Image (spheres, rainbow, N blue to C red):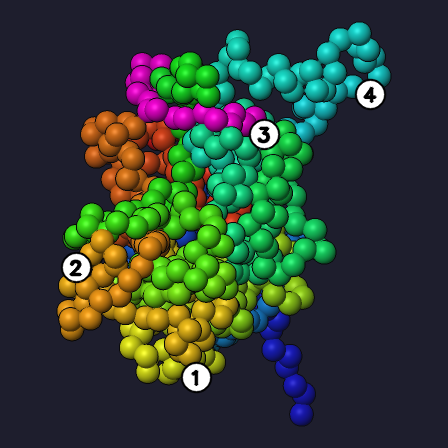
Amino acid sequence: MLQTASPSAHQIAAVWLDRFNAALGDPQAIAGLFRADGHWRDLAALTARIVTHSGSRSVAERLPAAAAAAGARAFAVDAARFPPRVVERAGEDCVEAILRFETAIGVGAGVLRLTLADAAVPMAWTLMTALDHIAGHDEETERQAREEPAFDRDFGGPNWRDKRQAALRYIDRDPAVLIVGGGHAGVTAAASLGALGVEALVVDRMARVGDNWRLRYHGLKLHNQVVSNHLPYMPFPKTWPNYIPKDKIANWLELYVEAMEIDFWTQTSFEGAAYDRATRRWNASLRRVDGSTRVLHPRHLIMATSVSGTANIPEIPTIERFAGTIVHSSRFTGAAEWHGKPVFVFGTGTSAHDIAQELHGNGAHVTMVQRSPTLVVNVEPSAQLYDGIYYGDGPSREDRDLINTSFPLPVMKQAHKLLTAQARALDAELLDGLERIGFRLDFGEDGTGWPLKYRTRGGGYYFNVGCSELLVRGEIKLIQYDDIASFTPAGVAMKDGSARDGGLVVLATGYKGPDHLLHSLFGPEIAASVGPVWGFDAAGELANMWTRTGQPGLWFTGGSFSQCRMYSRTLAMQIKAAELGLHRAG
């Protein structure tokens, strides 16, 4: 009997795309191509912002009009990128294809997922569209425009170093973009802007590039593996360890700034800015190390002060009675001086555990104080499950990044619930031991694990690298904050009448969100127009991150290394489009 070959993933995607191209002007036809629970996520390609629409009706109401306004057409499988394949995502088998398409201002890239319940009439589960490059202003064209001629050089004139030093002073001009914060978020944004020919200046109050990592606690390493943490344009060397130490990160950032020709002013504090609507520029006040003030007039301000940038020091009743040393985890740098002495670590997140373990390793007598339930996951293999896209053979890192940006929040939650259940099974022995000593556990909203805790509150979890075992064995003590009656000069008095001594309190109480300084730096009107930054908005996007805000010319970046790498380009594309007059800046 003659067998008919099943259609390939490429064929299935191509058939759907033919129908999609034909249906672009017809909302009813578009609705028929998406599952009822389908999603469309746009990264500044059709809507000039980052936005998600969920449900086939919502997609049909918005996508055709957005496509028409953007001049989007000719959606097709991108033959130059990783080919379509059948893959499991969030527990469902689907065809996943990387796309290209055209718009009025350039070329877009996308990711399409079709479910296989009925291969004859495939239905779209997710579609992501992203602006890939602007016609005539792609990175290679911009690079060639900066290229100096090989011949007819002026050997009597300034060389490259002379020009760099002169440009860095900004004596006779203003940068198009001022970036506040020189960590990985700020420098990746600057690198992506520079690649598109947009001049950006990074300012940071630290004395040296990388100090925001270099000056953190002694034993700090990244807790996810190097494979997902590369910076754009300059990936880490293949010889590097899986878990990068803080000083290695700091030194790499310093090298990165030099190699990528990023304009960077150290020892410079941003003191606030006012927006001039007539000129569409900022009046941004900077305080230099010598006490002088410099006012710059950029068209755009990017706040890159980090999701974990400013210490959160909560009000703790009676702590003023304590006669010992109190320090926030952000300023804790050394444990050796506490050898043989009793100390308290308030908090049970990653920094709290790491600092407690470092103190214990230096001979201190450590008591952790738990204030709220905490998610605990072994650093291997459980914590790494959520970065599975970056492991194994297959797509390039650029293609993996594109795929990683293509998951709308409901699909991400579905996937993370499965991964968290897997992690709990792998870590069952450890978790049981923690519960036996009274450690209060949680597993994220609806069991979605640590990544979504990070995206909502910037913490509340611990990647176990050994401290949990120290707690279970009693080598590090655990008490609950609610069992403390009050502080005393020598330590704490417990509600059961006992007392615990301590000479040091480390407040590992987390960090404030990126929006906490909006009011003081920009005033109440701008703060109100922007609203919350970080955490999910009603559409399931991180609020005001990497996209235009309610205030023209004000942008935000931050997050993990992978988030900053992926979205720095999306952010830079939007600003480049605004500079060209293709999109308004806000």
Left or right: where 178 falls relative to 493: right
Residue 362 is situated, as x and y percent measured from the top left of the image, at: 50, 61
Badge 4 or badge 1: first in the primary sequence: 4
Residue tagged 2: 486
Q: Using the numbered discs, state the Cα–Cα distance from disc 4 to disc 1 in whole angstroms.
A: 65 Å
Q: What amino acid type should be assigned to the residue bearing mark 1? A: Glu
Neighbourhood count class around disc 3 (C-alpha, 10 Å): few under 14, some 14–19, many 20 upward: many
Looking at the image, residue 305 sits to the left or right of residue 262; the answer is left
Compared to residue 233, the image places residue 493 above or below, namely below
Q: Nearer the viewer, residue 391 or 128?
A: 391
**Which residue is disc 4 drawn over?**
150
- Magenta stretch: residue 85 in it? no
Whether 201 is drawn above or below 329: the answer is above
| Front in this rendered view, residue 378 or 535 | 378
Residue at (31%, 14%) from the top-left corner? 278
Which residue is found at the position 32% from the left and 79% from the top? 437
Gap in angstroms between the C-alphas marked 3 and 2: 50 Å
Write down the region rendered in magenta: 263-282
Query: If you read the primary sequence from the N terminus, does the residue marked by circle 3 or circle 4 appear first?
Result: 4
Tag 4: residue type? Ala
Tell me which residue sits at (36%, 78%) in the image: 434
